[in-house]
Amino acid sequence: MTAQNEPRLLRIGVPSKGRLAELSAQLLNEAGLPFKRSERSLFVRCRDLPIEVIFLRADDIPVLIAEGAIDLGITGADLVAECGLPVVHRLNLGIGSCRLALCVSVDSTVNDPRQLAGKRIATSFPRVTRNWLAERGVEAHIVEISGSVEIMIQLNVADAIVDLVETGSTLTANQLRVLDEIGRYETVLMQHPQVSDTLLADRIVRRLEGIVIARTYSLLEYNILRSHLAAAEAVTPGFNSPTVSALEDRDWCAVRAMVRRSDAHGIMERLEALGACAIIETSISNCRL
Ligand code: PRP
């Protein structure tokens, strides 16, 4: 087969800059799709699979998926919503969570979005903002800005802004307050509706899913009296169901179950109160469930 006739490699678009670029590279690496980007290169071939990673602006990724230029892409769900094109959501990646909020100055007398009818709203999310306002019957003048939205009220360009809020420190620093929440978003893996190699695309999704679940859950093991097993199982129902094994002492059994990492301490305390012992939490680095 000549190079010309060879099927195109599956293309994954990842953000080229910033925190999302680092997090995406880390995630793909953990999913067994390692790549090494040489300085300024915009394409790189994965070592072990017929996959090409392409470095792009995060806000171009939804458009390029819709156009079929790339098959899969990692980007913010906020950017996907703003682009409004028919791309397929495959996976939430458990990173980059933020909310899009309608904000006014802390000393503003506005307490209801309807009071913004006829006023100016600055945002980098004109489409999402217009739709949200239209659903509430509010007509406002949208000022489209691509960055530094948080200073637009001070600059007297707008009466309100719609911007992303992560920690809230930008709002505090600019004396703004949230009037209403428009949406919650996180980093996602999106796909073109018809990829050429669906099996390979599904393999990538499964690999990434294994890593995302492993980051969210840990494995808890403990011993418990059989008479208290039902109560303990209610505390640790597991991802599907807990694994229960017999112990030499027939009155006791060993239980293994996945728990949300963020809940592990509380669950261990509840198990201890039920008489469980040898309670061990282990991190999971990868899984298939
Ligand atoms: C985003 C967003 C806010 C800020 C919110 O800006 O537009 O300004 O982060 O984060 P915080 O709640 O943790 O303060 P980004 O840094 O991405 O740059 P931008 O202003 O150019 O969009």
Image (cartoon, rainbow, N blue to C red):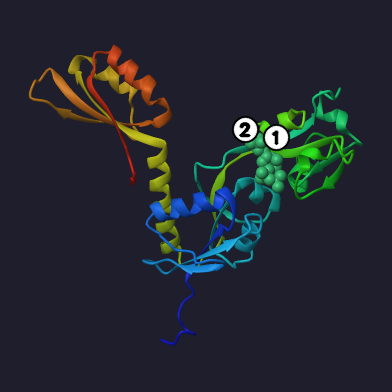
Specify the farthest residue to the left. Answer: 248
Q: Residue at x 86, y 32 (%)?
A: 116
Q: Tell me the residue at 40%/46% (across/down).
A: 211
Q: In the rendered view, would you say 92 is above or below 65?
A: above
What residue sits right under mark 1 in the picture? 170
Q: CA distance from mark 1 to mark 2?
A: 8 Å
Name the residue at the bottom extreme: 2
Whether pointer 1 and pointer 2 mark residues with C-beta atoms closer than 8 Å, the reply is: yes
Q: Quadrant location of the N terminus?
A: bottom left
Ligand 1 shows up in the quarter that is top right
On screen, residue 92 versus residue 77, left or right, reads left
Q: Amino acid at mark 2?
A: Thr
Q: Residue at x 85, y 36 (%)?
A: 154
Instruction: State left or right for residue 260 relative to residue 95.
Output: left
Q: Give the residue pinned by disc 2.
A: 167
Instruction: Please name the amino acid that badge 1 sits on.
Output: Thr
Q: Does mark 2's beta carbon lie closer than 8 Å to ligand 1?
A: yes
